[in-house]
């Protein structure tokens, strides 16, 4: 009985937010994924087109408020400083609760004051004027990548592009951050 009251209260709390009608009181909208045969992100995109940039979707008894507008996300996380759900961010920070994936970096930082300090430190690295000065280094690495690919572009040789892009990224970081070729 208490569980039913809890679920009813959750539905009442989030009832003012637009969203698709729940298929079940307990299972929410989860049957949509099976019925349509879509991925969750595709389902969210369809709902965003119908219900707008903010809507609620029910995963079993848990409401998921989906915000698909970058401006609203920025407004909520930076201007309003809304709290982040620690359980969600910890899943991204530490994969399977054990392996460090993104750690406690800029993306997964829950404390807004520490996040502001880290963001302030990294902002100058992405300033337009600074990036314009680095274009010759980017072009050098891109030219080397194209020359390397032209050597193996016979239509038969298999090239792991992820590996090539990884090497090019490391080359750019080496040139820009450490002045190394």
Image (spheres, grey):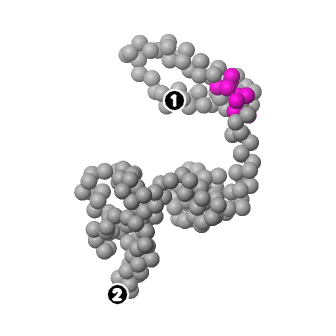
User: Up-down: is 60 above or below 52?
Assistant: below
Residue occupying image coordinates x 41% and y 21%: 158
Picture coordinates of residue 42, whole percent (x, y): 36, 50
- The image quarter in which residue 33 lies: bottom left
Q: Relative to residue 69, is residue 176 drawn left or right?
A: right
Q: Nearer the viewer, residue 113 or 19?
A: 19
Q: Nearer the viewer, residue 145 or 35?
A: 35
Q: CA distance from mark 1 to mark 2?
A: 56 Å
**Residue furthest bottom as drawn:** 1
Query: Which circle, 1 or 2, is nearer the viewer?
Result: 2
Quadrant where the N terminus sits is: bottom left
Q: Which residue is mark 2?
A: 1
Residue occupying image coordinates x 31% and y 67%: 21
Structural crowding at the residue carrying mark 1, measured as other residues with C-alpha within 10 Å and reported as few (<14), some (14–19) or many (≥20): few
Labels 1 & 2 near each other (Cβ < 8 A): no
Q: Nearer the viewer, residue 65 or 31?
A: 65
User: Up-down: is 133 above or below 99?
Assistant: above
Picture coordinates of residue 98, whole percent (x, y): 54, 57
Q: Is residue 100 in view from this perspective? A: no
Picture coordinates of residue 102, whole percent (x, y): 58, 50
Q: Nearer the viewer, residue 171 or 98?
A: 171
Q: Residues in magenta?
A: 130-138
Q: Which residue is mark 1?
A: 163
Give the tally of numbered discs.
2
Query: Helix, strand, or loop for circle 1?
Result: helix
Q: Relative to residue 123, is residue 141 drawn left or right?
A: left
Quadrant where the C terminus sits is: top right
Query: Helix, strand, or loop for circle 2?
Result: loop
Q: Relative to residue 17, is residue 30 drawn left or right?
A: left
């Amino acid at each position: 009985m208490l569980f039913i009251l809890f679920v009813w209260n959750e539905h009442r709390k989030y009832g003012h937010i637009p969203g698709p009608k729940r298929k079940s009181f307990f299972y929410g909208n989860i049957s949509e994924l099976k019925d349509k045969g879509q991925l969750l992100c595709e389902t969210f995109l369809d709902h965003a087109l119908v219900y707008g940039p903010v809507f609620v979707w029910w995963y079993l008894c848990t409401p998921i408020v989906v915000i698909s507008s970058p401006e609203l996300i920025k407004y909520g996380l930076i201007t309003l400083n809304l709290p982040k759900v620690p359980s969600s961010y910890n899943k991204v920070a530490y994969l399977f609760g054990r392996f460090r994936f993104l750690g406690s970096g800029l993306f997964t930082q829950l404390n807004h004051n520490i996040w502001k300090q880290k963001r302030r430190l990294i902002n100058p690295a992405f300033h337009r004027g600074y990036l314009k000065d680095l274009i010759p280094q980017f072009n050098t690495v891109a030219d080397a990548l194209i020359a390397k690919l032209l050597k193996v572009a016979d239509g038969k040789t298999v090239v792991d592009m992820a590996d090539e892009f990884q090497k090019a990224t490391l080359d750019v970081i080496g040139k820009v951050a450490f002045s190394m070729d």
